[in-house]
Image (spheres, helix red, strand yellow):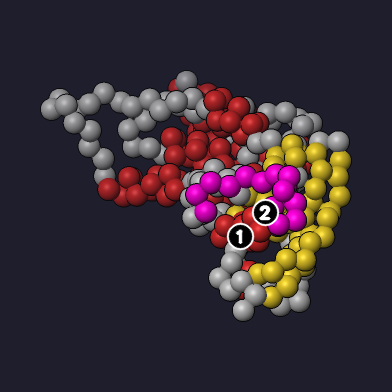
Amino acid sequence: MATKRTFRVWRGDAKGGAFAEFQVSVDPGMVVLDVLHRIQAQQANDLALRWNCKAGKCGSCSMEINGKPKLACMTRMNSFGESETITVQPLKTFPVMKDLVTDVSWNYEQNRRIPKFQPRPRDPDGKYRMYQEDVDRVQEFRKCIECFLCQDVCHILRDRHGRDGNAFVGPRFLVRLASLEMHPLDTADRIPAIRDEFGSGLCNITKCCTEVCPEHIRITDNAIIPLKERVVDRFYDPIAMLMRKLFG
């Protein structure tokens, strides 16, 4: 049986906007994206929002729902109280284009800055060989769907984005750097750039990025902290520093 629910949806553009309230019928089994489509079809034909697969695999429908970064297609209506008002707004970290659509192009610019995968030569028989545990370690990072929820919730990016430019690439791209740096076939040395260009030292490991990841990637524990450890080993380990001074 359909029930009436109250939705507060942010409407506006880069110049400004405000929340608009909608009373909408909700059927059992619906997700937030379904309801937004119903509002779009019946009450606000010009409502702008992104979506694609509706299966939690494309990352397109990222938004903030009741103040938390989530995928609209994976947020079920029965997760809210029956009388609860659902507030939907665009990602706060990135510039608004229209309504629930934000300009996330900055993320793709950061991706282009990362040095590419540089594999070592093949073995004499023409094959590559890797330990399964090394493959498993980086496989987790490949689950990322680039929804940018981790980028949105990161308080370092919220504070610095647009002010310090590219000082910090954010958790999504530290994950990509980890996937390359830990790859058993890769030969590139990215540790200096991870410290100096990509801002690994700015992250204070609050784990907020891990908490919002829809693919349950352990961003902080498995990607960011190991990268920080490699930077410390290279540049701040007193024994290693002494050895470099003595032997070069």
Q: Main secondary structure of the magenta part?
A: loop
Residue identifier under label 1? 34
- Residue bounds of the magenta highlight: 39-54
Residue identifier under label 2? 41
Front-most of 128 and 227?
A: 128
User: Where 210 falls versus 99 (above or below)?
Assistant: below
Residue 120, x across and y down, in percent: 30, 26
Tag 2: residue type?
Ala
Residue 19: in sight, yes or no? yes
Q: Which quadrant of the structure image shows residue 46?
A: top right
Q: Are marks 1 and 2 in contact (CB under 8 Å)?
A: no
Q: Secondary structure at mark 2?
A: helix
Instruction: Residue lying at the far top in this picture: please name it.
Output: 248
* Magenta-span inclusion, residue 50: yes
Question: The N terminus appears in which quarter of the rendering?
Answer: bottom right
Depth check, mark 1 against mark 2: the one in front is: 2
